[in-house]
Amino acid sequence: MTPPSRLPPAFRELAAELREAFARWDREPRPWPEARFADLALRSFELQWHTVAPYRAYCEARGASPDTVADWPDIPPVPTAAFRHVDLAVAPRAGGDLRFRTSGTTRGDGERGTHRVVDPELYRASLEATFARLVLGRPARECGPNGPLVLSLIPPFARGSDSSLAWMSDDVAAHLGRPGSRSVAPRGEPDAAEARSSILACAEGRIPVCILGTTLAVDAWTRALEAKADALELPPGSVLMDTGGAKGRPGLQREEVLARVSATLGLGAEAIVNEFGMTELLSQRYGRGSADAGASPPLVAPPWLRTRALDPVTLEPMPEGEAGILCHTDLANAGSAVSVLTEDLGRVRDGVLEWIGRAPGAPPRGCSLATAELLRAGEG
Amino acid sequence: MRAEGGPPASRDPWHLPGLPAAAPLRHFTGTSPGGRGFRVPALDRETARLVADEVRRSALRARRERSTERVIAAVSRAALRLADPGQPDGAAAARELSEEMGWPGSLTAETLAGMRASWTAEALAGVVRRELGGPEPLDGWTTGGVLAAPRRRRASGPPLLLVVHAGNVPGVAVTAAVRGLLVRSGVLCRAPRSEPALLARFARALSEEDSLLGHCLATTWWPEDETEPWDSWVKRSRKVVVYGGSRAVDGVRARLPAHVDLVAYGPRIGIAAILADASLPAAARALARDVCAYDQQGCVSPRLVYAVGRDGDAVGEALAEALERKTSERPPPEPDADTAVSVRSARAEAEFASLGGRPVRLLASGELPTWTVVVGGDPLITEGLPRFVRVHQVEGVRELERTLEPLEGRIQSVGYAGSTGLDDLADMAARLGACRVAPVGTLAWPPPDWLHDGRPQLLPLLAWTERE
């Protein structure tokens, strides 16, 4: 698919360069020189400053412009709240755009943000290279017909979904999985019988399987297997990717899920890969194995995604390895917001992220509360 | 190891008459900005019972052996020792408050001055006089007093009163204990985790002033999910007073047997109205004083400001200027990470709502989360964050009342500046169940006899007996 001409020439040029760089890393996964990352990030910033009026106004209020921002860490990050209020895309709306919506769970008020993706090919190039290398452990070109059978517990994007995870899962199945790869939740809930028969067929042919699912879906599926004493032995080379953690079920421990996956699917901790993704970011991080209680396993990223832990008060960088609020600079976001400030806490050591969790919100202070709580109490 | 007495220490914020000397101490971390750790004894069912029995026995004995006047004198002397920085207890209390709350010395001094005014013998006797007509109904049978009747009556607090503090407004715990002692109850307290030291210091001072009265008060802290001393103390108390948020109040309510009354001081909100004829710079300065005093920890401080019949932007700008000046004089303590993230998030919501074309305006202290004013947006939403004020424009008091109706019964104070429509504003406040209407600049410092949550201070604790 050729990017449509409504895209600004600077973006088209940048996106082509990025796609090529992503593909090169897929072929030869080497770290990027600092200068290359900085150059691409600053060009993304300049493009966004010129084309996204609300972002330019945000930058101007902070005295930041392409003339004053000298290095990529100085790019004013866009708070995730911005996605709820403004369109951050670098080009006017068009039919080929993807519109991903956030889950609305962050603030608990159901208000959802939108990330409009003007160049799905750039997203695809980033996610496929990253998934192939960091989850499947081989270049993307060696996947496809020769790849695993991808079975996704996530409902397909075509079902009217606006979830970036659904789009990504569909894409992984379509481009990195062998024929027959698909979502086994076409009607919303995973079809355990269909998953089971596909896995048994693969086991017979010793074809590796790649399972994709939210942590909650994986937990529910493996609990059901456990209840029926129906353990499945996944063929060698199989892998399971879970994402989302305990979101929606506080208290769910990753160690429990790992143990259940291991007992019911025969996968060791190294074959269970945790994904860290956000609707606001088009690149992902992945981590294998176990983790400290409540935190993620160490999450690695492709060289075009860098994460910094910042002091929540000053936004100055925290010392290496110390917890702070996370700020991601993601070159796959060249078409929207290259730098994103989250409400997540985590630690970064040698570029590897340990995600601690969402900042829980300000603790109650005295008897003076947010009116939302007062109004809720009034309803009760 | 120390069961009673011993040197006062902020790291041992407990006072438990009747506790066996062998009770082991446990360490906890504090939750205030200073976050100092502390040690309190582990109470099991038996030790909790011993403490409750000792406090109850002492309270019943004090009813026989101490007049209310004498109680007032001793309680006042003990409380004033804390509130006077010239005395050793007061100096220690001032140091602890500054450390624990992260306060500047000027705010500590201001707070202690407020406590001094509230805890004089005259102030305490005044509360008894205004609510009961005098101490007589507490000391014996009388036909006089506020409930004057042909038959003789007397009033008593419960032999054991449990007071639970889940808030973090300094000094409230001592005031609540004082009220319990004035109605001649034995008082068992769960101190606020954020500031447990002041109440324990008061209890020790009271012991030194009057050893029997010192045995009428116990205070400590324990984790919410532990069964003791909850079970033992709730079972033995006839009334429970709780200060805190909805979760804390609901949590205590759920523990109570049917025969135990609950007096709950739950969450409320403070608002302010800048009336059309108010001088804006002066009103803004006064508002900034209210906002910065305790960083809006108390529900008396204004969070929502309404420009009544005047330009909301102008009110917001004047308030922003006043907050900037006040913050340079009195910077807030550094926020914890969660609060800083929440302030940033709320600011980003407002800023990008504005950039997205909504009628919202963000005025803030640069990137540092010290003070924030948001003009416009949802006229009822607040965040419960420090030095964070929302300003809205309304045409008049009638529109203001319509706006505030969802908060009926949940408004603590209505501040005002100006006089145009003030009577209408006060009537509106009464209809909405607000507890206090007062000029801006005084909101953070209610008078000693104010109607907290719209209630008298002593009457809710009392039961009356009538003799025919």
Image: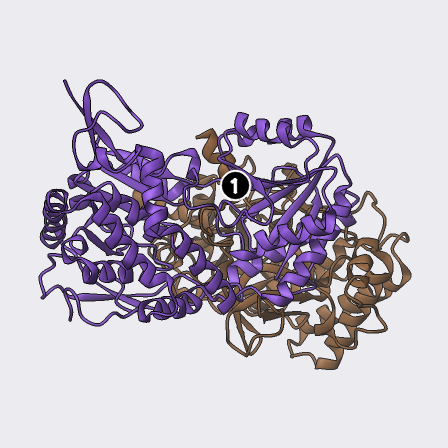
Chain colours: A brown, B purple
Which quadrant of the structure image shows residue B312? top right
User: In the rendered image, which quarter contains the C terminus of chain A?
Assistant: top left
* Chain assignment, label 1: B
Which quadrant of the structure image shows residue A70? bottom right
Q: Which residue is mark 1?
A: B269
Is A293 on the left or on the right of B220, as rendered? right
Q: Is residue A169 visible?
A: yes
Using the image, determine if residue A110 lies above or below residue A354.
above
Local secondary structure at mark 1:
strand
Which residue is at the front of the view, A99 or B296? B296
Percent coordinates x, y for residue A285 in the rendering: 58, 64
Which residue is at the front of the view, A2 or B190? B190
Number of numbered labels in the structure image: 1
Residue sitting at x 15%, y 41%: B236
Using the image, determine if residue B453 lies above or below residue A292.
above
Which quadrant of the structure image shows residue A377? top left
Residue sitting at x 34%, y 34%: B131
| Identity, as a three-letter code, of the amino acid under mark 1 | Ile
Residue sitting at x 16%, y 29%: B141
Q: Is residue A148 visible?
A: no
Percent coordinates x, y for residue B134 in the rendering: 28, 36
Is B382 on the left or on the right of A264, as rendered? right
Percent coordinates x, y for residue B419 in the rendering: 68, 36
Is B300 on the left or on the right of B402, as rendered? left
